[in-house]
Image (cartoon, helix red, strand yellow):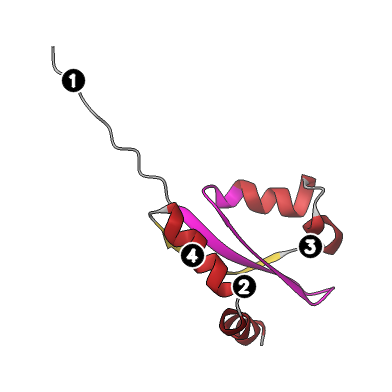
Amino acid sequence: MELFYFCITMNYTVYILWSEIHKKHYTGFTSNLTERLRSHNEYGKDWTARYRPWKLIFTKQFKEKPEALSYEKWLKSGVGRKFIQALQH
């Protein structure tokens, strides 16, 4: 009997959302971008629900979760916020 091993590669996406109406951005990461965007725009009840609708303005893919978290942290730093502001214009 042969055993087959499947390596499931999970990709992580760091994303930036923009609320044109409220002039706010949101930075996050997820392993399922489609479902996460639905959550922000349709059925979520967290902070982002107050500032709907959200438009996706940036994504970056990572293979490893620690890399995605590190990049998300960078985006929330002073230099990262300047990068985000440049996207909004």
Q: Amino acid at mark 4?
A: Ser
State which tag comes first along the sequence, 1 or 4: 1
- Which mark is first along the chain, 2 or 4? 4
Q: Which mark is residue 76?
A: 2
Tell which circle, 3 or 1, labels the residue nearer the N-terminal end: 1
Instruction: Tell me the kind of residue under disc 3.
Output: Pro
| Coordinates of residue 64 in the picture (x, y in percent) | 39, 54
Label 1: state its secondary structure: loop
Calculate the distance from the C-alpha at mark 4 to the C-alpha at mark 2.
10 Å
Residue 82 screen position, x and y as percent: 61, 86
Amino acid marked by disc 1: Leu
Mark 2 neighbour density, 10 Å: few (under 14) some (14–19) many (20 or more): some
Q: Is residue 21 above or below residue 64?
A: below
Tell me the mark number nearer the camera, choosing from 1 and 2. 2
Q: CA distance from mark 3 to mark 1?
A: 48 Å
Marks 1 and 4, how far apart at CA: 36 Å
Residue where numbered disc 1 is placed: 3
Q: Secondary structure at mark 2?
A: loop
Looking at the image, residue 23 sits to the left or right of residue 74; the answer is right
Does residue 58 sit above or below 37 in this rendering?
below
Per the rendered image, the range of residues in magenta is 12-34
Disc 4 target residue: 70
- Inter-mark Cα distance, 3 to 4: 27 Å
Residue at image position (66%, 54%) is 37
**Quarter of the rendering containing residue 66:** bottom left
Quadrant containing the N terminus is top left
Q: Going by the image, does 30 lie left or right of 62?
A: right
Q: Earlier in the sequence, mark 3 or mark 4?
A: 3
Image coordinates of residue 7 in percent, x first then y, are 29, 37
The residue where tag 3 is placed is 53
